[in-house]
Amino acid sequence: MSGSVVSRWAAGTAVGLVALSAFPLVWMLLASLTPEARLFDSAALWRGPFVLDHYRALWSERAFWVPIRNSTVVAGTTTLFAVTIGGACAYGLARLRFRGRYALLAFVLAVSMFPQISLIAPLYLLLRAAGLINSYPGLVLPYLTFAMPLTIWLLVGYFRQLPAELEEAAAMDGASRLRTLIEITAPLAWPGIATTAILTFVYCWNEFLFALSFTLGPERHTVPVAIALFRGQYQVPWGQILAAAVVATVPVVLLVVLFQRRIVQGLTTGALKG
Amino acid sequence: MASIALEDVSKVFAGGHAAVRDVTLEIADGELLVLVGPSGSGKSTLLRLVAGLETPTHGRILIGGRDVTAVSPQQRDLAMVFQSYALYPHKTVRENLAFGLRARGVSRPEIDTRVRRVAQTLQIEGLLDRRPAQLSGGQRQRAALGRAMVREPQAFLLDEPLSNLDPALRLDTRTELALLHRRLGATMIYVTHDQEEAMKLGERVVLLRDGAIEQVGPPLEIYRRPATLFAARFLGSPPMNVMAGAVAAARDGVEITGLGLTLPLAEAGRFASGEQVVVGIRPHDVELATTDGAQGADVAAIVEVVEAAGSELHVHLRAEARRDQRFIAVVPADLEVAVESRIGLAFRRDRLHLFAAAPAR
């Protein structure tokens, strides 16, 4: 009896939370389809007719594919580097026994604790000296400084919970550390690696401050920067901003939906003992 | 196949815990050696030292006469069967078997032949394309064994390979392992905490205690002539009965404390008169005098519990004169023993064991 009450409460809470967090998204989607003239006419928001004007304007007036390409390149490259280098690093920290590995791990965490805003000026000077302002590496490198600690921390935890016996079995089988990492550990850690990659990608995709500071022109602006700069001197094109936000959300949602099944799958199979 | 030798091997872990102390041991080519001991006795650590998964803090390890102390597990050419089996969960049984061969650069056709041959031997041909999650416990155990066999290693290291099987399967697999050992003529080190398994499987048993060797020998020899009280109590089921006592003045026997009984023991000559000692007798060597038993019996006792164990009875008793002195007697099942009845115990004089009171360490 009380169980069903509890589960009803739990279900209610879950629905409420989902509704609460989904509402702005739904609003955003509806508003992006509403003609500019009726946008602030709240009673009309839920009625049609819906139009694709704002979306058309994104491509015809704004060349929105440039920031999308930039964001994809920067977030994708950062994720690739963070997961491969950070993954190898995390494996070492999780498995090798050496002095000071806890100190190292704490240091990695400490690095990610710096407030971004305090890094802007020194990073800008560094990047300018290296001639990397307004370039892809000029964003990927700073992004790695916060993406790497994130991946390392997530993956150390993930590698640690994999049974060490599997790697020992591989060692007895004569497999080198590298072969073990590639053939045994990585496939088993795949759900963790995928989760980490998604988090890193989303983080980079949404990053605003560095992107705004280290890019100069629209040819290198990422999606959040481009959207922020939509607003003109005399008017704010809300319809286009919302349409752009919808477009920017799509890859993230796709990514999560695409990987979600494999993540859950990976977590439930591969048990050692029955 | 090769012999394995441990010379004065010790392993002290970072925290200062000495898991293995000064172990010197030789395992002949083709021998099946069983390492047995209670949990925490260092038997698994010893096996991992041989495997190369741990590095000794002192001593040398030789395989086939070659010093491998500093050699990585990859280069030692040993195969290990883990307690959890440690099958690669994302690979099929075939891939599990082939992995070690691929890592060693064996050619593809050769791998296929060897995998098929081993699968045939272990009767797991039908399971080759399944993943570990789709196998039963016994099948996993075979797959793990297959992964070791296919490698044709210098020696097999088995870490409690049967402890995850249910009892009936365990018995079958144990027999099979013994057969397999004979057919392969392989050097095997077998770790178990189960004294019965050790007794039945080993040609030679090493009894470990707190990381050091307590006694080495054929199982029956350790059973018949345990060197220490610990060895006496650990091997054999139910465990040996023990009685505290003091060496008689003439050093030809032992006066058992609190029972008013003197047991003649020639061995007592090893000790000083009056020295504290322990006398042991196996439950099978305790006889029950039929009736009320004061006559001709060594000790009068009260029956506490009677357990039927198939063809025999395990009778738990305590001495009448000393309530904290307990005994177990194993007698034929057709004997009628009533609980709470008073009964006389007789100890077979030729089956008494004598140990120092404070076990030598």
Image (spheres, coloured by chain):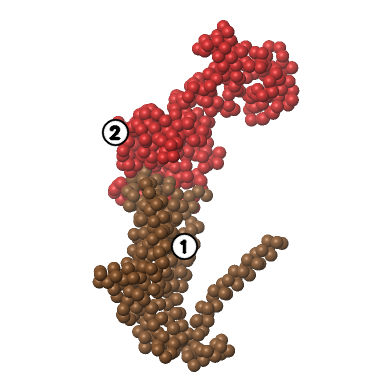
Q: What type is the residue that disc 2 sits on?
A: Arg
Q: Which mark is residue A263?
A: 1
Helix, strand or loop at disc 2? Answer: strand
Q: Residue at x 50, y 81 (%)?
A: A28
Give the residue furthest to the top: B250
Q: Is residue A240 above or below residue A166?
A: below
- Compared with B286, A155 (above or below) is below
Kindly indicate which chain is depicted in red in the rendered structure: B
Q: Position of residue B316 (x, y in %)?
A: 66, 26
Crowd tier of the residue under label 2, counting other residues whose Cα lies within 10 Å: few below 14, some 14–19, many 20 or above = few
The amino acid pointed to by label 1 is Ile
Which sits in the foreground, B71 or B108?
B71
Q: Decide if residue B47 is in sight here.
A: no
Residue that carries the numbered disc 2 in the rendered image: B66
Choose between B209 and A231: the one closer to the eye.
A231
Q: Specify whether B109 is left or right of B157.
A: left
For residue B83, side relative to residue A220 (left or right)? right
- Which shade is chain A? brown
